[in-house]
Amino acid sequence: MAVKLKIPLVLLALFCLLSALYYFYLYQVDDPLSGIHCESSLYLSHALEDTDGTQEVIDMTASVNFAFTGNKQGVVIIGGLISDNNHRYKFKRTYNFSYLPKPMFYEFTFKPLTQQSDDEAPSKLLNTLFTKVGTHIEIRWLDDKNLLLSNMFSPMQVCNITQ
């Protein structure tokens, strides 16, 4: 009787081990960015045409900190200065993001999380700039300490891995 009971327990343990390995493969191996924290400097400048036909130039200088938390998700903190034709604002925003690997790039979806109390920038100004940047980002490894982030609408950035 004891031998008959051991066989199902061994099979159950083996099934649990194989299930755990499969889970690890799906959620860790399938996400090569998992656990990476990196930081970068960013300068963006866009000329936008207002409804009256005049040009508005939006400039942004910022530091960007990415934390890829796993399961194709993460958090990004962006802080710096943004200016339009008339004003200059300090800002610091935190966004949750998720991403899907596509051939040649990653497709990001950003969700606003928090705005710091000393953030002066109007959300409309930042949203306008970020929609011009796009959400399809190519990420390549330069070496074991640097990632190259680029897309069609913004300059390439080197993101220095901190962890």
Image (cartoon, rainbow, N blue to C red):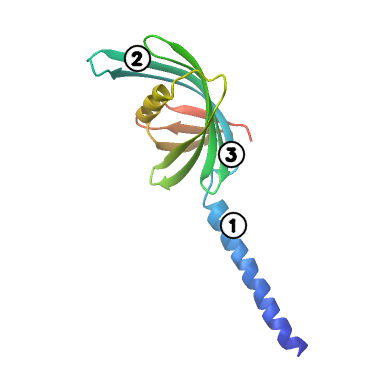
Report x, y in % for residue 89. Answer: 48, 14
CA distance for labels 1 and 3:
17 Å
CA distance for labels 3 and 2:
34 Å
Mark 2 element type: strand
For residue 46, which quarter of the picture?
Answer: top left
CA distance for labels 1 and 2:
47 Å
Q: Residue under label 1, please give it.
A: 24
* First in sequence: mark 1 vs mark 3: 1
Q: Residue under label 2, please give it.
A: 57
Mark 1 element type: helix
* Name of the residue lying farthest toward the bottom: 1
- Judge the density around disc 3: few (<14), some (14-19), many (≥20) Cα neighbours within 10 Å: some
* First in sequence: mark 3 vs mark 2: 3
**Mark 1 or mark 2, which is nearer to you?**
2
Please say if the residues under marks 3 and 2 sit with CB atoms less than 8 Å apart.
no
Please tell me the numbered disc located at residue 36. Answer: 3
Q: Amino acid at mark 1?
A: Phe
* Name of the residue lying farthest toward the right: 2
Quick check: 129 left or right of 95? Answer: left
Report x, y in % for residue 102. Answer: 39, 46
Q: Residue at x 77, y 87 (%)?
A: 2
* Name of the residue lying farthest toward the left: 53
Report x, y in % for residue 1. Answer: 76, 90
